[in-house]
Image (cartoon, helix red, strand yellow):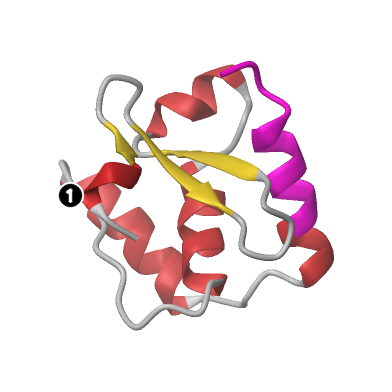
Amino acid sequence: MTLDNIDWRNRALRVRQAKTRQSLQLPLTDEAAKDGLVTSEEALRYALSLPIAALISGINTLEWLEKNARVAALFKPFSREEMAALELRCSSKKQ
């Protein structure tokens, strides 16, 4: 993943799934929760479920820090089915 994967204008992270070659767009802020697409908790849990060595999460407020810490402390990786459902939900949104 590189900085080219970040869509700064739409405040989203673009990822191409290696297995399915399907494009996935994950929000970089809580704003996506307003349209019901995905919550920040789901996005963080999704990212933590990927085979990564580190995750850098932007934190603008103490509330956001506490929310991210709660997700990390209670972290349970998404199942394959949960990952697929979230990917489908995100990829079906008009981009």
Q: Is residue 81 left or right of residue 27?
A: right
Residue 78 position within the rendered picture, expressed as x and y whole percent measured from the top left: 68, 69
Q: Which residues are magenta?
A: 84-95
Question: Residue visible at 79% across and 49% down?
Answer: 85
Question: Residue visible at 35% across and 35% down?
Answer: 29
Question: Residue visible at 46% across and 65% down?
Answer: 71
Residue matched to label 1: 62
Closest to the observer, 50 or 33: 50
Where on the picture, by quarter, is residue 46?
A: bottom right
Closest to the observer, 57 or 60: 57
**Quarter of the image that includes the N terminus:** bottom left
Residue 92 colored in magenta in the image:
yes
Residue 74 position within the rendered picture, expressed as x and y whole percent measured from the top left: 52, 75
The residue sitting at the bottom extreme is 53
Q: Is residue 94 left or right of residue 4?
A: right
Residue 67 position within the rendered picture, expressed as x and y whole percent measured from the top left: 37, 55
Residues packed near mark 1 inside 10 Å, few (<14), some (14 to 19) or many (20 plus): few
Vertical comparison of 18 with 21: above or below = below
Majority SS type along the magenta span: helix
Tag 1: amino acid: Leu
Residue 47 position within the rendered picture, expressed as x and y whole percent measured from the top left: 48, 63
Q: Is residue 93 left or right of residue 50?
A: right
**Quarter of the image that includes the C terminus:** top right
Where on the picture, by quarter, is residue 5?
A: top left
